[in-house]
Image (cartoon, rainbow, N blue to C red):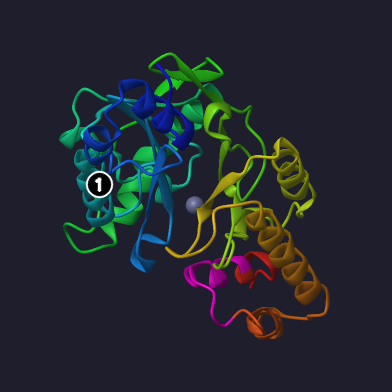
Amino acid sequence: MELLNRRTLLKTAAASGAAAALLPSLAHASASGTELFTSDEAGLLVDSTVILGEKSAVLIDAQFTAGNAGLLADMIAATGRTLESILITHIHPDHILGLPVLLDRFPQAKAYAQTDIQGILSQILGGMHGQIAGAAPAGVFADRFVVPEALSADHILLEGERIEILPPMAGDTALITPVHIPSLNTLIATDIAYIDTHLWMEEVAASGTDAWRASVETLRAIGAKTVIPGHRKTASPNDASVFDATIAYLDHWEKARAASANAEEFRAKLLVGTEDLGFAFAIDRGVAAAFPA
Ligand SMILES: [Zn+2]
């Protein structure tokens, strides 16, 4: 079975000779074969991608707050597909704390993370959940956490189509697995690319941005038409321009940092020209990491 894309859809419709009858039933499927959910600012503008087969679906990343995860679950339910798998692309809480909400709604689904990433999650997820959920009013976050299963394979199958899980590479954290769906000409860059938001710089403040930049170029070279970033605003583009936006922000950040003597100066320089970006929550942590008190 093929994943749904416009060509498949038209081919199928033409072959059946029942385009008019077929199209309405598939109207909820986007032409690209994926549906995107972008959280609100409280959920840190994080993207989750639902990859649609004819009857089944795979979800990439599971949201941060319980509210956003619930809305994502509604969106998945509306596709009419059975959710089979959920892949968590890296260890950050904004991509995994919503997982129990999704598993409650879709108990048949299995959650996975690449083996190395899963190993870290199994060590830190409990502490991370306790710290974040414990500091928030009841109900903002799921009241439990779920460690995904380790996935050693380099792909997930959706109705026989390969969803390629790329080897871990560096972005806003050291190990991230982007996802490539060749049959849809689509790349899910997750937190290696951002657009129209600030970037999470805390973990690269010490190590520098070279490894992150190299990952951007690795992904850009794949040449996918649709590129879904980790964080964006709902109306932001999903194409190769997310790579340019990411590099531009890294350049801006490093230039501002090099020209600053202290945290206050750095913060002021960082905010010039970036006033309209979302995910402002990232600023303080990045500045503090660059200029520790
Ligand atoms: Zn993120």
| Disc 1: which residue | 75
Name the one closer to the observer, 182 or 148.
Answer: 182
Q: Is residue 210 above or below residue 79?
A: below
Q: Report whether 151 appears left or right of 253.
A: left
- Coordinates of residue 136 in the picture (x, y in percent): 26, 62
174 vs 41, nearest the viewer: 41
Picture coordinates of residue 72, whole percent (x, y): 27, 48
Indicate the quadrant where residue 215 lies.
top right
Q: Quadrant of the N terminus?
A: top left
- The amino acid sitting under disc 1 is Met
Q: Is residue 187 above or below residue 132?
A: above
Q: Is residue 236 left or right of residue 13?
A: right
Q: Is residue 151 left or right of residue 109?
A: right
**Closer to the camera in the image, 104 or 35:** 35
Picture coordinates of residue 119, whole percent (x, y):
49, 26
Give left or right: position of 88 versus 274. left
Residue that lies at the very extreme toward the front in this rendered image: 17
Vertical placement of residue 251 versus 264, above or below: above
Residue at the image point whose x is 30% and y is 45% from the top:
98
One can see residue 47 in this view = yes
The magenta-colored residue range is 275-286
| Residue pictured at 43% horizontal, 35% vertical | 88
Q: Tell me if I can see residue 178 in this picture.
A: no
Q: Residue at x 42, y 37 (%)?
A: 33
**Quarter the C terminus occupies:** bottom right
Q: Position of residue 84 (x, y in %)?
A: 30, 24
* Dot 1 beta carbon under 8 Å from ligand 1: no
In this rendering, is residue 207 above or below 76?
below
Q: Is residue 276 magenta?
A: yes
Query: Residue shown at 76%/44% (left/top)?
Result: 217
- Secondary structure at badge 1 equals helix
Please tell me how crowded label 1 is: few (under 14), some (14-19), or many (20+) other residues with Cα within 10 Å. Answer: some
